[in-house]
Image: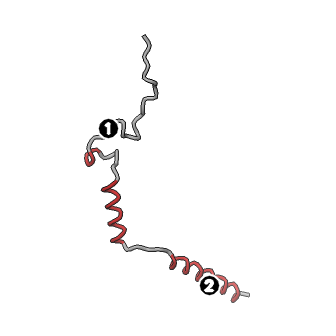
Amino acid sequence: MPTEIRLQRQMEHNRKLREQFERDRISASQASILLIQYCQGIKDMFIPTVWGEVDKKDDPFEIQPTTCGCSLM
């Protein structure tokens, strides 16, 4: 009985190792290049010192006016 349990554990371990082996991988340098390209290409509204001030209409975090633009006298 114990040998069957060990065999089952070993088979499960082998299955997990095969799954890990089949995963797509990229090198650390390639991942770093992709991260740098992403950071340089995406404008971050929270870092105005790097990207400059953001126009209020382009800022997704700014509360946009919901009025119709009408005024009462």
Residue 41 on image: x %, y %:
32, 55
Q: Where is the C terminus found, in terms of image quarters? A: top left
Q: Is residue 19 above or below residue 63?
A: below
Residue type at mark 1: give it: Asp
> What numbered label is drawn on residue 69?
none
Residue 40 on image: x %, y %:
30, 56
Residue type at mark 2: give it: Gln
Residue 54 on image: x %, y %:
31, 40
Say left or right for 33 vs 61: left
Is mark 1 in CB contact (under 8 Å) with mark 2?
A: no
Mark 1 or 2, closer to the camera:
1
Residue at numbered disc 2 = 10
Q: How far apart in space, not on screen, are marks 1 and 2 (Cα)? A: 60 Å
Q: Secondary structure at mark 2?
A: helix
Q: Is residue 33 above or below residue 13?
A: above
Residue at position x 64%, y 82% in the image: 9
Say left or right for 18 vs 54: right
Nearer to the camera, 72 or 26? 72
Residue at numbered disc 1 = 55
Structural crowding at the residue carrying mark 2, measured as other residues with C-alpha within 10 Å and reported as few (<14), some (14–19) or many (≥20): few
Q: Where is the N terminus found, in terms of image quarters? A: bottom right
Say left or right for 62 vs 51: right
Nearer to the camera, 23 or 70? 70
- In the displayed orientation, state which residue is furthest to the right: 1
- In the displayed orientation, state which residue is furthest to the bottom: 3
Q: Is residue 57 above or below residue 21?
A: above
Say left or right for 43 vs 19: left
Q: Earlier in the sequence, mark 1 or mark 2?
A: 2
Residue at position x 41%, y 41% in the image: 60
Residue at position x 44%, y 13% in the image: 72
